[in-house]
């Protein structure tokens, strides 16, 4: 499986979710590669911290807008069971390239109206990527929800009206999500009894349950 996390808006926990997703797959005895396509390099730093502290960590490689080429990520991915791509927090060539090689796009969206408004642009990018990879699947995941607020209680309705599949699983605003990267761990390994671990495992299980056998992608080695 090649999974990309894409978001047009920062602050929704995209990189934290990407890292925690990859660490959970690793804990399930999968061979996992993180592709760090985000200039902030959060995933790369997390792997470095894990190694310094003696924690197991996925392999990591930095890639950019050429990753879609047959001799780039498609060639590297053959050596792994799963690839998790952390993309920049804005739409553009890198996110499009990631989607062109992905089997599944996970779109973290916060509970605010501003977060929801970005979905229309993401839908357009998904349709462009499907020109090259028709079986690309996608789903929105609600992140950092604050259940005790009015906006948090009503956050799912506008997502479900977007036309994109919305996962039943979600993340809430918990300290474990904020602290885990600094410890060189995914949230489920950092705080296995915390609700954040339950949330993460539920997201991973739901995404894996939605996966279908991908069709052959159109060759795009000489251009898009």
Image (spheres, rainbow, N blue to C red):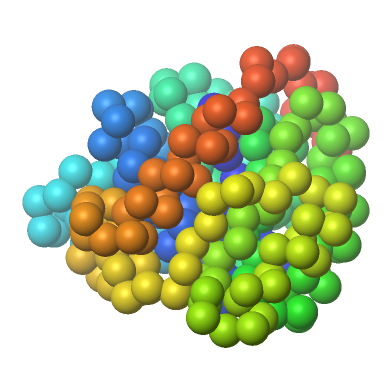
Does 199 appear above or below 77?
Answer: below
How many marks are shown on the rendered structure? Answer: 0
Residue 73 as seen in the image, left or right of residue 201: right
Please name the residue shown 76% across and 79% down the image. 113
Please name the residue shown 21% across and 55% down the image. 193
Residue 129: image location, x then y, percent: 82, 40
Whether residue 61 can be seen here? no
Please name the residue shown 43% across and 24% down the image. 81
Quarter the N terminus occupies: top right
| Most foreground residue, 171 or 27 | 171
Residue 204: image location, x then y, percent: 46, 40
Does 165 appear above or below 26?
Answer: below
Toward the left, the furthest residue is 54
Toward the bottom, the furthest residue is 149
| Most foreground residue, 15 or 155 | 155
Residue 49: image location, x then y, percent: 22, 62
* Residue 70: quarter of image: top right
Whether residue 163 can be seen here? yes
Please name the residue shown 84% across and 35% down the image. 130
């Amino acid at each position: 499986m090649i999974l990309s996390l894409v978001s047009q808006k920062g602050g929704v926990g995209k990189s934290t979710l990407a890292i925690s997703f990859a660490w959970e797959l690793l804990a399930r005895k999968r061979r996992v590669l993180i592709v760090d396509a985000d200039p902030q390099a959060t995933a790369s730093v997390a792997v470095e911290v894990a190694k310094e502290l003696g924690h197991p960590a996925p392999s990591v490689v930095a890639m950019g807008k050429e990753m879609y080429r047959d001799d780039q990520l498609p060639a590297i991915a053959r050596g792994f069971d799963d690839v998790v791509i952390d993309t920049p927090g804005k739409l553009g060539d890198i996110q499009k390239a990631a989607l062109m090689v992905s089997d599944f796009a996970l779109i973290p969206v916060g509970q605010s109206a501003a977060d929801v408004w970005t979905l229309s642009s993401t839908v357009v990018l998904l349709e462009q990527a499907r020109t090259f990879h028709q079986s690309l699947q996608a789903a929105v995941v609600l992140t950092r929800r604050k259940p005790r607020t009015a906006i948090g209680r009503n956050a799912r309705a506008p997502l479900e009206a977007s036309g994109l599949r919305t996962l039943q699983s979600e993340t809430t605003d918990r300290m474990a999500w904020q602290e885990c990267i600094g410890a060189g761990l995914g949230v489920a390994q950092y705080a296995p009894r915390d609700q954040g671990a339950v949330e993460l495992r539920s997201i991973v299980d739901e995404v894996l349950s939605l996966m279908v056998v991908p069709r052959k992608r159109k060759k795009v080695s000489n251009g898009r």
